[in-house]
Amino acid sequence: MNRPDPDTHPPPSNRLSFRTWAESDHDLAISLWTNPEVMQFLGGTGTPQAAIERLRLEMQRQQQFGVQYWPIFRRSDGAFAGCAGLRPFHNEHAVFELGVHIARPFWSGRIGEEAARAVIAFAFNHLHARALTAGHNPDNTHSKALILRLGFQFTHLEPWGPLEIHHPFYRLEPSASSEPATDISTP
């Protein structure tokens, strides 16, 4: 994989803009990753210090791999809407995991879907990803519905987090249709 410029990020979508995280983004990181509603299915509410550590991890990923969960902002007024992006998946060459964390005020209007579609296009068109993966907490029906709307196909269950709860994982190939997928993750 060719590493892109360390400041590269997806181009704007209709309603959203992306940029890379900066050390000065402590308040944004804390507002997102300490919110109990946002973090309900993402490992639980973190502390402000854990949110700052996550911010630094995202910045490190950008430097090392050219990807991160980029902060997203509403274009009309610059309001912080959360983050959406990529991280390397299990050391597979040019395979990334897609993630979307949306701030509570933006849970309606399919902001997460718009951000995810922009990241997917960036991954395949700019980074030349071979595939994308996505997973979700088995109790998070909204994330499951989003992943299926994006065209991902179920592949396997994988233990995740400190409790090693088996999360469904899905895969999207560059040539895959964006038609909703059939869910086969539950009997």
Image (cartoon, helix red, strand yellow):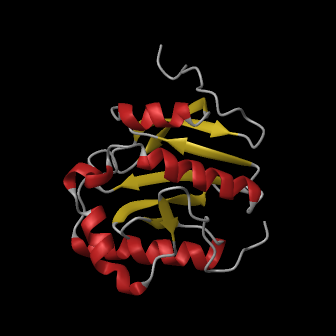
**Quarter of the rendering containing residue 11:** bottom right
Most extreme residue toward the bottom is 24
**Nearer to us in this view, 144 or 102:** 102
State left or right for residue 67 relative to residue 99.
right
**Quarter of the rendering containing residue 82:** bottom left
- Residue 48 picture location, percent across and down: 23, 73
State left or right for residue 128 relative to residue 91.
right
In percent of the image, x 64 and y 72: which residue is there? 66
In percent of the image, x 22 and y 49: which residue is there? 37
- Residue 102 picture location, percent across and down: 36, 54
In percent of the image, x 43 and y 61: which residue is there? 83
Q: Vertically, is 141 above or below 29?
A: above
Most extreme residue toward the top is 187
- Residue 182 picture location, percent across and down: 58, 20
Check the picture and name the quadrant holding the N terminus. Answer: bottom right
**Quarter of the rendering containing residue 175:** top right
In percent of the image, x 63 and y 80: which residue is there? 6
State left or right for residue 42 relative to residue 10.
left
Q: Vertically, is 174 above or below 50?
A: above
Residue 46: tell me if it is visible: yes
Residue 157: tell me if it is visible: no
- Residue 33 picture location, percent across and down: 30, 63
Q: Vertically, is 130 above or below 76?
A: above
Report the label total: 0
**Nearer to us in this view, 142 or 46:** 142
